[in-house]
Image (cartoon, rainbow, N blue to C red):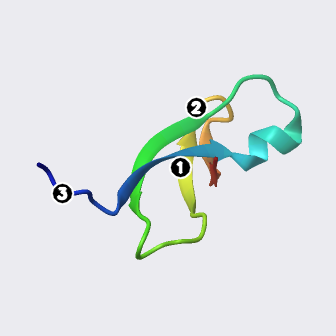
Amino acid sequence: MGKKGNRIQIILECSEQKKSGIGGVSRYVTTKNKRNTPKRIELKKYNSILRKYTLHKEIK
């Protein structure tokens, strides 16, 4: 049997695009260690619709 890890898959969604009301969604899928970072993470990622780096927040 394989051991269970602490890494879980999460989805990051652009918060600036949501506020602006522009259609479409910018999302990234990544992993995080739930033991080291129990809170939701925020990263700056590239948004191809807005064509700039924006703040992406973890969604459930």
Question: In the rendering, at what x and y percent does residue 33 appear?
Answer: 38, 65
Instruction: Name the amino acid type tagged 1.
Output: Lys
Q: Residues within 10 Å of mark 3 (few under 14, many from 20)?
A: few
Instruction: Name the amino acid type tagged 3.
Output: Lys
Q: Quadrant of residue 35?
A: bottom left
Query: Foreground residue, 10 or 28?
Result: 10
Query: Residue beneath label 3, please?
Result: 3
Q: Residue at x 68, y 35 (%)?
A: 50
Instruction: Name the amino acid type tagged 2.
Output: Ser
Question: In the rendering, at what x and y percent does residue 44 appear?
Answer: 56, 57
Question: In the rendering, at what x and y percent does residue 22 appear?
Answer: 82, 28
Mark 3 secondary-structure assignment: loop
Q: Does residue 36 lie above or below 19 as drawn?
A: below
Q: Residue at x 33, y 63 (%)?
A: 6
Q: Earlier in the sequence, mark 3 or mark 2?
A: 3
Taking the view exactly as shown, the residue that stands out farthest to the front is: 1
Q: Residues within 10 Å of mark 2 (few under 14, many from 20)?
A: few
Q: Which disc is residue 10 wearing?
A: none
Q: Give the Cα distance between marks 3 and 2.
A: 38 Å
Q: Give the Cα distance between marks 1 and 2.
A: 10 Å
Question: In the rendering, at what x and y percent does residue 58 appear?
Answer: 61, 53
Q: Which disc is residue 48 wearing?
A: 2
Q: Give the Cα distance between marks 1 and 3.
A: 32 Å
Query: Residue beneath label 1, please?
Result: 45
**Would you say 58 lies left or right of 19 here?**
left
Q: Does residue 28 lie above or below 44 as drawn?
A: above
